[in-house]
Amino acid sequence: MELLIKNLPFILQGIQMTLSLALATLFFSTIIAFVLGTLATLRFAWLRIAVKVYVELFRDIPLIVNIFFVFFVAPLFGLELSPFAAVTVGLSLWGSANGTEIVRAGFNAVPKHQWQSAAALGLKGWEVYLFVAGPQALRSILPPFVGLLTLLVQATSLGALVGVTEFFKVGQIIVERTTMMEGWNPAFTVYGAVLLIYFVICSTLSWFGRWLERRLKADRSRVAPGTLIVEKPVTQLP
Amino acid sequence: MEFDLAYLANQWPALMRGLWLTIQVSALSIVMSVTVGLCGAAIRVLQVPVVDKIVVGYVEFIRNTPLLAQLFFIFYGLPGLGLKLSLFWSGVLSLTLWAGAYQIENIRGGLETVGKGLREAAFSLGLSPWRFFRLIAAPMAVRVGLPSMLNTSISLLKNSSYLQAIGLAELTFVAIDRISMDFRTVEMFAAICVIYLALVLTLSFFASRLEYRLNTPFRT
């Protein structure tokens, strides 16, 4: 406890770093996910295949390997990435692969007659996406995206392995410092506290995701019956 | 900087040793996590008082904390309680606990598809609870739960790479270790990416085959 108070500014700094890492990653993942997810619903087979390869590649390679890869290989191509940037890139590749699947499933869940009616009303392709399919798809996209954010917050702990001083790394440093300076090993307390704080952050997010899901589902019943049958997109584990 | 195949050929035995450890850890953890999943799901479904609340808490806790932090807690933290585990067993334990939480949910999801009506019908036909479970509930639950159980197992295999952080000499560890000595970055990463991809794709191929087989009675 005393340890916690003494290191409070340091810990808060770590949490801030974790959150900014998570948000930066979420930002890039969302952009890539929406672009690729939309492309995957177009009627070009080669586009679909390309997106599929991207998704499978980054989901099937362990995230750690992915981050190390960006961290170690980018400099060889003359790109000097800071650890923060390397982790952001690595996590964004992984996050966007997961996000793409969510977006694709969201668009696929929009009933076919919606697309057909929109086309019959003379809307252009992009108008259908923006005004008809998009808003409906968003409803099934948002809750899993909150889930993705939870996973991203958890995944930022991998930043510690390449030297980003985020929350987990802060915990590691505190353990090392105390062991060296004071001669006792507080690993149990510190890592226990780290777990608890992650739990608080992530379960708040998960709770928010569930709330959003319920909320969006409840909204649906207000629409005239039979207009909207949005199925929950299939989301997978990290 | 050119791609040096001879170097890779040289390091191949080391990589294979790493791969073997990865497979050992993963296989052991998969078996144990399914066991955890079965017990946990049974407790949840049977609504054993108090214990089922603990299971809910366990699942929530694992799902909302990073695996890396769990791993460090087990490897560095538990000795503070006098529980000193070897590298290997710390890894197995943390992967088991992590995947176990997901398996509980997967199996429970499967079991919940077996409706109340089926149970009543089975009991009125004079089946014992055990025979009902073995002959009716389990086969149905497996069909629903199996795909996500296999997904979790594949994730476990990928996440075994987390164990390099505590220094278990599995595949990723070997690769990073060699890179820090020889700076053959591209070759090493290409090699382990290909190995992981091959492992995961093989597993998911068998997973989809199995799923297909199990669904045979339901196909028209």
Image (cartoon, rainbow, N blue to C red):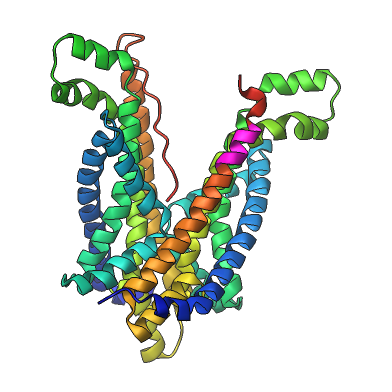
Q: Is residue B40 left or right of residue A27?
A: right
Relative image position of residue A174 (x, y in whole percent): 35, 78
**With A161 as the anchor, is B207 left or right in this view?**
right
Comparing B113 with B153, the one in front is B153
Vertical placement of residue A203 versus B183, above or below: above
Estimate the x, y position of residue B130 in percent, counting from the top left: 81, 35
Q: Residue A99, relative to residue B12: is it above or below?
A: above
Can see residue B168?
no
Position of residue B213 relative to residue B12, above or below, is above
In this rendered view, identify the residue nearer to me: A184 or A38.
Answer: A38
Residue at left offset 54%, top offset 42%:
B148
Q: Main secondary structure of the magenta part?
A: helix
Residue drawn 42% across and 68% down?
B191
The residue lying furthest to the front in this view is B6
Residue placed most toward the observer, A158 or B66: A158
The answer to if B210 sits in the magenta stretch is yes
Drawn side of residue A68 relative to residue B94, left or right: left
B13 inside magenta stretch: no
Picture quadrant of residue A64: bottom left
Q: Which residues are magenta?
A: B208-214
The residue drawn where x is 37% and y is 57% is A154
Query: In which quadrant will I find the N terminus of chain A?
Result: bottom left
Which quadrant of the structure image shows residue B78?
A: bottom right
- Residue nearest the viewer, comparing A105 with B19: B19
